[in-house]
Amino acid sequence: MIFSLENYLFLSKWIPLPLSAIKFIEKDESHPFHNIMDIKKTQIIEELKKLNKQSEISINKLIVKASKIENLIKENIFEKLQENIKRWIANRIQIVTYFDDNYPVRLKTIKNPPKILFARGNYDLITKDAISIIGTRNPTEYGRNMAFKIGLRFTELGFVVINGFAKGVDIEAIKGSLKVGGKIIGILGSGLLNPYPKENVEIFFEVINKGNGLFLSENLPNDPVKKSTLATRNRISSALSIGNMFIEGSAKSGIRYQLKYGKEQKKPIVVLKPKKDNPNAAIPNQIITEEKHCYIIKSIDDIPLIAEKLIEINKKKEKSSSINSQRKLSDFKY
């Protein structure tokens, strides 16, 4: 990465500029924004306008952004950034930018990929086959029990369990995985030094200390949770999985966001068949009715065959992606 970490954080999180603009700056080693603390407001405005003229770049509120940049520089923002980075690293937080070699390939292909990831735990899990098991925060007793059993069974079949680490279905699936020594990935809607929800904090630190999992967030480590970040993290959970497993959710449940992102990303859909008169049956029934190619779990015995199908589909996708990448590279040969 050409950017210094301080510059990248400044442009991507404090201002922030869209990823399209940051990509453009990254390609130009002589761009003034690589040394942004040394330029004046008039030049900042000029450079922002130049960026905005590029066909794929759209920057809103140019003058406001220029003033914000100027004020932050006057407030010694770069010294504060350096202090923050040292503190985050001291807390075993890894900072992964879009341009780093270890940035997840599965995230680069999605709409609106995270500009930066903060990671805490076993980062090697990022490339493993994972199943995203999600559902309502207020499951029925049936939903709670099945979430635990499904998390456990997929783990026995070699999967990492990934979800938003919410209370209810999410945490039950994680508990099921951990019960049999599994590995988990939690995508937080808050910063990694401010884990949410508080009910799961004990498990959060247990997982980290035992090396049983990984926690990711695109939010700054001390950030509190926001309603918007609880929704947008679903695109990450879906992207890093090879399939989305839905267990209970009312019509207004937050899992509808993961269903939306998963369909955009063309991820296989798995759903637990709900019991009759289940108050959380709305989204499972919607999936069963509308998604012709979904996989339905009626009992735990259905999981091994579904797991085989998910792995088979993922291998075909990876093979196709590899062939397409080779074709793109061949375009540059004479």
Image (cartoon, grey):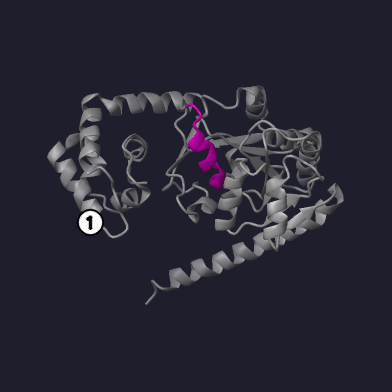
Across and down, in percent, residue 92 comes to: 52, 28
Residue furthest to the front: 277
Q: Nearer the viewer, residue 184 or 246?
A: 246
Kind of residue at badge 1: Lys
Q: Is residue 94 left or right of residue 86?
A: right
Q: Nearer the viewer, residue 8 or 219?
A: 219
Q: Main secondary structure of the magenta part?
A: helix
Residue 259 can be seen in this image: yes
When asked about the image quadrant of residue 71, the answer is top left
Q: Is residue 240 left or right of residue 99?
A: right
Q: How many residues crowd around disc 1 within 10 Å: few (fewer than 14), some, or many (20 or more)? A: few
Which residue corresponds to mark 1?
53
Q: Nearer the viewer, residue 54 or 26?
A: 54
Across and down, in percent, residue 287 comes to: 69, 54
Give me the residue at 57% from left, 46% from top.
257
Can you say which quadrant of the picture contains the C terminus?
bottom left
- Badge 1 marks a residue whose secondary structure is loop
Give me the residue at 71% from left, 49% from top.
284
Q: Is residue 107 left or right of residue 160?
A: left
Q: Is residue 5 left or right of residue 136?
A: left
Relative to 105, is 207 above or below? above
When asked about the image quadrant of residue 82, the answer is top left
Specify whether residue 271 is painted magenta: no
Specify whether residue 231 is painted magenta: yes
How many numbered discs sit on the rendered protein? 1
Relative to 238, is 146 above or below? above
Across and down, in percent, residue 208 comes to: 63, 28
Across and down, in percent, residue 16 comes to: 33, 39
Residue 118 can be seen in this image: no
Residue furthest to the bottom: 334
Give me the residue at 55% from left, 64% from top.
321
Q: What range is drawn magenta here?
A: 224-236
